[in-house]
Amino acid sequence: MQNRLTRKPIEIKIATVVAVAIILHETAIPILEAALKEMTAGTPDFFDDEFAIIDVDSILGEKLDWVALIALFKSFGLHAVAVRNALEENHVTIRAHGLSIDVTSKVRSEPEMPPSTESVPAKPIAVISAPAPQLQITNVPAMVIDTPVRAGQRIYARGADLIITASVNNGAEVIADGSIHIYAPLRGRALAGASGNVNARIYALTMEAELVSIAGIYRTFENGFPVLPAQHPVQIKLIGDSIEVSSMKSAA
């Protein structure tokens, strides 16, 4: 009885939540569906119940079928929770569909076309993994993981580099605001520079990744991996708006 009396009915704590950003360049549902099918290459669990933020910056002023859009994303394992860069006049409609407004984004009162500050492929839809809006933390030591990262696990080194001394298995996801160092095979997903650091890099002893990303620019390997010298560690970095995968020996 004493335990029940002292126990709080509910507790609210700060939690790190990682979401993917869905950047829309088209509004037509059939076009978006075709783009998602091409992106996932028929893999049913490509997106495994990911939280998603819908970015409408590129389609401001265009009408969206929110019911169909949310259902489409859900069918691909993406659970839309918020909208980024929406016009203020559309906030009521967006909230009526159960979505939140990304309050850290710039609110516009009328459509405008600002100069682009990042390289985004001119595709109907782009999906990037990124941490949900949060405080920036600096001077944080690297996070070190000494055990294998297994399928279904997600590790996020907020404001820090991530060092892993064991394998990252298929279906696992490792994320860092800084660089990622993997002293073992990389078979899952690795996303460095998650808060926008274009100078972040990924290093792996063996490259067998499902997906790699730096500062939101991603690359998958459905068509095979680059031909690299055997038995040499791999370096992954951002060159312009493209991901480059190279041998550490050739990069020296």
Image (cartoon, helix red, strand yellow):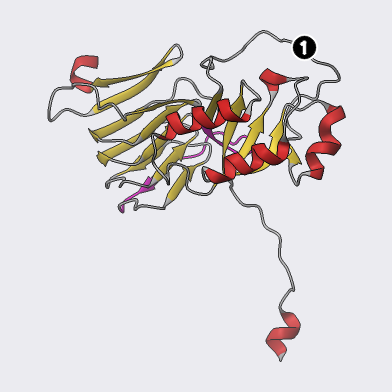
Residue 226 inside the magenta-drawn segment: no
Instruction: Give the residues in magenta.
Output: 128-147
Question: How far from the left and from the top, in percent, is residue 185?
Answer: 24, 40
Camera-side residue of 57 and 102: 57
The answer to whether residue 122 is seen in the rendering is yes
Q: Residues within 10 Å of mark 1 (few under 14, many from 20)?
A: few
Image: 109 above or below 69: above
* Amino acid found under the numbered disc labelled 1: Glu
* Left or right: 90 as drawn, with respect to 227: right
* Quarter of the figure with residue 67: top right
Image quadrant in which you'd find residue 100: top right
Which residue corresponds to the image point at 73% horizontal and 29% vertical from the top-left? 64
Q: Residue furthest bottom?
A: 1
Q: Where's the C terminus, which quadrant?
A: top left
Residue 249 percent location from the top left of the image: 18, 19
Q: Position of residue 8 (x, y in %)?
A: 73, 74
Query: Is residue 134 visible to us here?
Result: no
Element under disc 1: loop
Task: For the N terminus, give its image quadrant.
Answer: bottom right
In the rendered structure, does residue 141 fall within the stretch colored magenta? yes
Between 73 and 204, the one lying in front of the other is: 73
- The residue nearer to you, when weighing 209 against 46, is 46
The x, y position of residue 31, in whole percent, is 56, 25
Q: Residue at x 61, y 20 (%)?
A: 25
Q: Residue at x 31, y 54 (%)?
A: 147
In the image, taking residue 10 as reference, residue 158 lies left or right, namely left
* Residue 208 in the figure: left or right of residue 76: left
The residue pinned by badge 1 equals: 112
Q: Main secondary structure of the magenta part?
A: loop
Q: Residue at x 64, y 25 (%)?
A: 28
Looking at the image, how many numbered discs can be counted on the residues? 1
Residue 149 drawn above or below residue 206: below
